[in-house]
Amino acid sequence: MTTGNAFNPDFLNSSRFIAKTLPEEEYEGPKRFFNRELSWLAFNWRVLEEAQSPRVPLLERLRFLSISATNFDEFYSVRVAGLLELERTGDYPPAADGLLPSEQLTAIDKNARNLLKAQLEVLSELRREMEREGILILDRGSLTEDDQAYLDRNFIENIFPVLTPLAIDPAHPFPFIPNAGFSIAMRMERKSDRRSLRALLPIPEQIDRFVRLPDGAKGEARFIPLEELLIEKIAFIFHGYKVIESCVFRVLRDSDLELEEEAEDLVREFETALKRRRRGDVIFVSMSGATHGELGELVLNELGCGHERVFELPGLIGIADLQELVLPERHHLLWPKFAPRVPERVEEHNDDIFAAVKSKDMLLHHPYEAFDMVVRFLRQAANDPSVVAIKQTLYRTSHESPIVNALCEAAENGKSVTALVELRARFDEAANIRQSRQLERAGAHVVYGFINLKTHAKVSSVIRREGRQLVTYTHFGTGNYHPITAKIYTDLSLFTCNPALGRDGTKLINYVSGYATPQSLESLSVAPINIRSTLLDCIRNETKNARAGKPAEIWAKLNALIDPRIIDALYEASQAGVKISLVIRGICGLRPGIRGLSDGIRVKSIIGRFLEHSRIVCFGNRKKLPSKRARVFMSSADWMERNLDRRVESMVEIHNVTVRDQIMSQIMAANLFDQEQSWVLSPEGEYIREPHAKEDSPFNCHRFFMENPSLSGRGSAGAKGEIRLAHSHI
């Protein structure tokens, strides 16, 4: 398929592409949707393609390859596991696109095998380029005598004490291999009498996957995979034996959590469920050797796994671990260093966050503006004698979290601290349990929200006594309170002391802490109560405007769009003449560019240096976007059934003029304008990227944000230098 103007990624200035006509029966049926799981795989293909892009520094390309592998593991251990369970229990219900679980599994298997093959091909090319740059991944046959002597010492001192070799015989049954367990199976022979021994050597996750050797004569950084080293040094472990056959294998298990709805103690129930998860059904096995050999058959039989769930890989297994080889000292092979900005307005107020927010609402765009402002907000609150209470939601945060430490400090300083900790944050459940106990020990009130709803909203309220009144300072975010991911995720942080938003934020927190259903919300919508209805009302209003001959337009930026009711409302709006431009990073179930259904809708995905994570929607409200009349929202929720119906989420309507202008004329406009990192979704489901020569300079929204301060964070001195990519229509 050709690209050209039909798939121009510049949605800000270009015309719409030509629509495709479908068979009549597909307009009302399930074929009007793309499959969720196959759309996710398409997203991971785009991530993998970044690992091949000559515009990306070499070690950043290696990082993209590692990310694609990590994504794949989670997809199989959660999404594929769920489909297998549905297939076992009756192969029902079908997905929105009409495919039954068994049909989806067949399509996924074919796609996934091609993806794994492509990952190894990309790794092979990257290894060649890394070798030219003096970064070597060695095998056993490449080791010199000096290398052997060094590895002997390193092995005995740093690896051997952690290893636990396991014989396999009637007295030593095959051990349990936990989720993500990585092992070497071996068939050996004793040299003295040729007696055979079958054994398993689990590879401890506490040891780095790649063992670094002394640098080469020309300064080469040299590594050997741990499994290669273990096989090479097997004589240290099984003295007097030689290896006849070996295979490396890695296991993925069903990682979803099953909870008892009538559990008396939610924390204890989660601790029990986490132990069960390690023992979930085997979903996927990657194996280096042939599965039809004696050793391969033994492993599969003991795991209770059929050949259909095995991926034989003729190369490195577990390539997510390649992240270890992204060497920070090789600056020229990484993205240029970028230091997030401190907003000028905060500096003008002598780093007093409350004073800066008191003067005007402030929207920070992470990671371009420092997430440290959020941490400072809570640290300042913890030590401010005028602050009487802090209320905070926590979905994900980091180990040794500065957010949690600030809340603990506040509680220890005698302030009323309420922390809403979500235990169901997938793969962070154990960390959240630890941090909830840390908060309780400090004297904070810790609550866990609803048993059947995840609390995914990001809100922090600080109540401060000013004179004779209490003033609420509120932070709403689109991302997690996580200072590590905030360096690579693009998210929005709104700081405000607007009384209406303060009341709304307090009602949201009270809803989670005490089941007090919020009434008369002023500028906030909350899922599962009314985010869906608010969105549908706004879409229908644009539809009504278009039918009345008035300008009608929608801009939205999301991580995922698969909710059928929202998609059908967008289809109806398109048919009425509403112009709809969507930036959907990951999963998209909407088919754009279908004549008579969605010919007014364009969809693109941006994959680049930073992970697009913020959720934004703008409605023209009888004007062409951007408009001073527009309705603008930022949210924690993607447009998925789980977010709109089974989670507690927030969606804030923005009324501050400068913040609205920043979201529309800077953030959304730059995403719509982006050319270098954008993939346009075709009516057939293919993502198409315009090729650019390395010497070209197509617009890159990440580069734009790194180089240009945001509107609402500017101080008085720089206000006249504000940069907009689009200007509001009256």
Image (tube, rainbow, N blue to C red):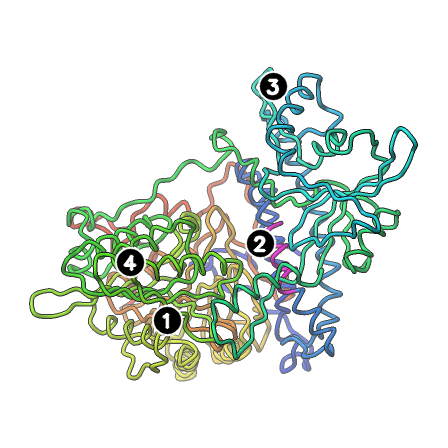
Report the residue at 57% width, 35% height from top: 325
Q: In the rendered structure, which amino acid carries the disc numbered 1?
A: Met
Instruction: Name the secondary structure under disc 1.
Output: strand
Instruction: Name the secondary structure under disc 4.
Output: strand
Residue labelled with disc 2: 4
Given this view, does label 2 or label 3 mark the residue nearer the observer? Answer: 3
The residue range painted magenta reads 69-79
Residue labelled with disc 1: 651
Q: In the rendered structure, which amino acid carries the disc numbered 3?
A: Gly
Given this view, does label 4 or label 2 mark the residue nearer the observer? Answer: 4
| Residue 344 percent across, percent down from the top left | 22, 47
Earlier in the chain: of badge 2 and badge 3, it is 2
Report the residue at 52% width, 56% height from top: 8
Q: Quadrant of the C terminus?
A: bottom left
Mark identifier at residue 184: none
Residue labelled with disc 4: 363
Q: Quadrant of residue 176?
A: bottom right
Disc 3: CA contacts within 10 A as few (<14), some (14-19) or many (>=20): few
